[in-house]
Image (cartoon, helix red, strand yellow):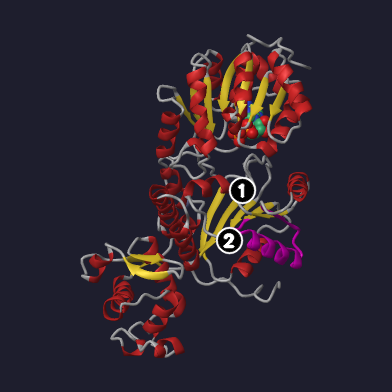
Amino acid sequence: MTTSGELVGADPAEVLRRVFGYDAFRGEQRAIIEQVTGGGDALVLMPTGGGKSLCYQIPAIARRGVGVVISPLIALMHDQVDALTTLGVRAGYLNSTQDFGERRVVEAEFLAGELDLLYLAPEALGSPNTMSLLARGDIGLFAIDEAHCVAQWGHDFRPDYLNLSVLHERWPDVPRIALTATATTATRDEIATRLELRDAPRFVASFDRPNIQYRIVPKVDPKAQLLDLLRGEHAGDAGIVYCLSRASVERTAEMLVANGIDALPYHAGLDAATRSTNQRRFLREDGLVMVATIAFGMGIDKPDVRFVAHLDLPKSVEGYYQETGRAGRDGQPSTAWLAYGLQDVVQQRKLIDTSDADRSRRRVLAAHLDAMLALCETVQCRRVQLLDYFGERIAPCGNCDTCLTPPESWDGTIAAQKLLSTVLRLDRERGQRFGAGQCVDILLGRKTEKVVQHHHDELSVFGVGADLTEPEWRTVIRQLLAQGLLAVEGDYGTLALTDASADVLSRRREVMLRKDPPRPSRRSRSAGP
Ligand code: ADP
Ligand code: ZN
């Protein structure tokens, strides 16, 4: 059937049934839809898969005029519009990928009021042509999808989103609904402020995804650890493996294929045709593993993704939660697995230090990283800590690694003092800074070439750390970094003291550390290139 305007003024439940074929609303969908259909604004916070699209699609159909949807997902507009058209909804989009002729058709439909929904990229609002087009049409509502992109505090800020303040100024009487699947309390407030939605009612769904099992493990031998996960628990399952760089995406995908796993790469450096083929295959075929940078995933609706694995430390808890939320949309048990190590911390700090962002942006990035590290090193329930970040309190979940095998903690005060005084002595007595490797060699009393060359075997701390092994020292360093008791700086990742280090050195502060679980089996060690 086609809507051709006949559902204007219809009851939302009727639209739900007749157009979308569903019997009942989910969660707060009805309240949201009534609010917007009645001409009010709304701020909607719902996890991925929660059913946000209907919250603006139904009001757009039921209200007079065209619903204008602002979405950053240009690559998906075509699919979204196709899906709506199949249902008989009159939808179109305008973006930079279209030629003049295609645009003309959509513009004419918009002006004639022959559309229920028009999808636009945010940059379009910076174009005088688009603005004058909008001014000549009859607009029923504005929907701002992925609204967290407007927040500078958020993890996914897009400058084009700042254009959106123009909507309220130019069309004060048109209702606006802003939606996002990821917003901490700070990001929510910033969205409300920037979009002039401070007085709009907020509809906040629970962000809990109880079917996803959260696990964060120390990175020891990432290749073998990943193969263990895929073969041991997820043989034949569809899943996503996130890597930080394009190069590691390529390497990891090749490694998996060499080990007989159906894996495809996805990153922004691949040509558009390869990207869209790989994405399509992942969506349509069973049991494929997508190895990707975070360029992949936004707007991907595949219900049976059984695992999301991170081989590198995500930059923020918000990003991490959104990425892992792509697992288990069908409600079936799924795994969110992350391996992280000292090198990740060093690398991420370096990325922040050397980025060309201004100082305040760098502070935001550093705060995001600290929260991510705190999640990795926590001894409490991962889900309690994750949801706390989104302002939600729950009881320990029983379905995360720390609930299932509570980590042991140990008093690491003396170890911390040994390490910190090594850093202090190098700095004070020698005016030198070194990375983790050299500090560990000094503590272990190793007369390496570099130790001898710098006369570090003459330091009083030389050899005082022989009670711990090298991996144990790296764990200590990683956790001190996560707790802000130690810092890494510069291109070479040299270690430096922080303001808080003094409290440990002067015994005013105890340091509790998390004991790493036993190392994983070596059985797949030799696998792969
Ligand atoms: P989001 O945008 O929040 O990630 P979607 O709008 O894509 O989520 O919805 C996720 C899935 O749930 C879609 O397949 C959608 O058709 C389905 N869905 C949404 N609302 C309902 C409902 N009331 N009843 C049944 N299915 C629904
Ligand atoms: Zn838990």
The spot of residue 212 in percent (x, y) is: 57, 48
- Looking at the rendering, which quadrant does residue 421 occupy? bottom left
Mark 2, ligand 2, within 8 Å: the answer is: no
The residue that disc 2 covers is 311
Residue 46 appearing in the image: no
In the picture, the quarter occupied by the C terminus is bottom right
Secondary structure at badge 1 equals loop
Q: Is residue 514 above or below residue 308?
A: below
Point out the stretch of residues depicted in magenta: 242-267
Mark 1, ligand 2, within 8 Å: the answer is: no
Q: Is residue 63 left or right of residue 478?
A: right
The image quadrant where one finds ligand 1 is: top right
Is residue 486 on the magenta stretch?
Answer: no
The residue depicted at 61 percent of the width and 45 percent of the height is 326
Instruction: Identify the disc placed on residue 333.
Output: 1
The residue depicted at 69 percent of the width and 62 percent of the height is 250
The spot of residue 33 in percent (x, y) is: 56, 20
Q: Is residue 161 left or right of residue 108?
A: left
Out of 529 and 195, give the one closest to the viewer.
195
In the picture, the quarter occupied by the N terminus is top right
> Spatial distance from mark 1 to mark 2, Cα to Cα?
21 Å
Secondary structure at badge 2 equals loop
User: What amino acid is found at the position of numbered circle 1 in the picture?
Assistant: Pro
Q: Is residue 424 above or below residue 209?
A: below
Q: Are marks 1 and 2 in contact (CB under 8 Å)?
A: no
The spot of residue 9 in percent (x, y) is: 63, 9
Residue 272 appearing in the image: yes
Q: Is residue 49 left or right of residue 259?
A: left
- Looking at the rendering, which quadrant does residue 469 occupy? bottom left
The residue depicted at 40 percent of the width and 66 percent of the height is 488
